[in-house]
């Protein structure tokens, strides 16, 4: 694969959009949905947004993966970087898969999207797919913390300009973006 000094602008856009969507979906799941009893009528509305958001995240991740494979990109920062980045793809696909499987097992398409009027199950914890969804979400949150920590380390400690690769600007084929001089 050819290298470039920055990621393709579509990858940059998808990166930041997906970051916001994934953080929102995790926050809704961990803090809003988890705190609501399944008998609360408004939980159906929140689930509708959460499920739709999860489907959007999956679709955008697939687009991002295709664009990533087909465009020039900077060399990995280190050997671990590629593992972590592909790990994000795997985790998001598994999250969507376990969420979809839980929705089917719990009858959510009819309840949440078709307005059947049927109640939500007493608890989603009874579904092994929901348990997997929860633990994958926890792992994904951990990956995000490590990812942000590594980015801050590169920016604030190493001062190597690595974050500029995920910004908009001129892409130099086969080149690297020079780091700013250290004051």
Image (cartoon, helix red, strand yellow):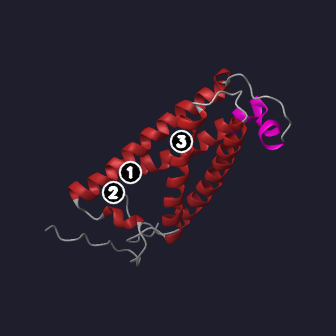
Q: Secondary structure at mark 1?
A: helix
Tell me whether circle 3 and circle 2 mark residues in contact (CB < 8 Å): no
Asked if the residue under mark 1 is in contact with the one under mark 2, i.e. CB atoms within 8 Å, the reply is: yes
46 lies left or right of 8:
right
The residue wearing badge 1 is 81
Frontmost residue, 33 versus 11:
33
Q: Residue furthest right?
A: 116
Height in image: 15 above or below 122? Answer: below
Image coords of residue 139 (percent x, y): 47, 36
- Of label 3 and label 2, which has the lower sequence position? 3
**Range drawn in magenta:** 100-114
Q: CA distance from mark 3 to mark 1?
A: 23 Å
Residue ID for mark 3: 26
Residue 17 position (above or below residue 35)? below
Q: Which residue is mark 2?
A: 77
Q: Is 82 positioned to the left or the right of 22 in the image?
A: left
Crowd band around label 3 with a 10 angstrom C-alpha radius: few (<14), some (14–19), many (20+): some
Magenta includes 130? no
Sequence order check, earlier mark of 3 and 1: 3
Would you place residue 59 above or below residue 32 in this image? below
What percent of the width, then of the height, locates residue 58? Answer: 63, 50
């Amino acid at each position: 694969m050819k290298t470039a000094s920055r990621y393709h602008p579509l990858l940059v856009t998808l990166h930041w959009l997906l970051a916001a969507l994934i953080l929102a979906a995790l926050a809704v799941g961990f803090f809003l949905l988890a705190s609501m009893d399944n008998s609360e009528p408004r939980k159906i509305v929140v689930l509708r947004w959460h499920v739709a958001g999860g489907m959007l995240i999956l679709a955008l991740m697939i687009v991002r993966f295709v664009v990533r494979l087909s465009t020039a990109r900077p060399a990995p920062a280190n050997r671990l970087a590629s593992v972590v980045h592909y790990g994000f793809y795997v985790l998001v696909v598994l999250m969507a898969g376990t969420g979809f499987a839980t929705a089917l097992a719990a009858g959510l398409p009819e309840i949440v999207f078709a307005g059947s009027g049927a109640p939500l199950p007493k608890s989603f914890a009874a579904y092994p797919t929901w348990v997997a969804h929860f633990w994958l979400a926890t792992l994904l949150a951990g990956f995000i913390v490590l990812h942000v920590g590594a980015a801050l380390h590169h920016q604030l400690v190493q001062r190597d300009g690595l974050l500029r690769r995920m910004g908009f600007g001129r892409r130099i084929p086969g080149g690297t973006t020079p780091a700013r001089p250290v004051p």
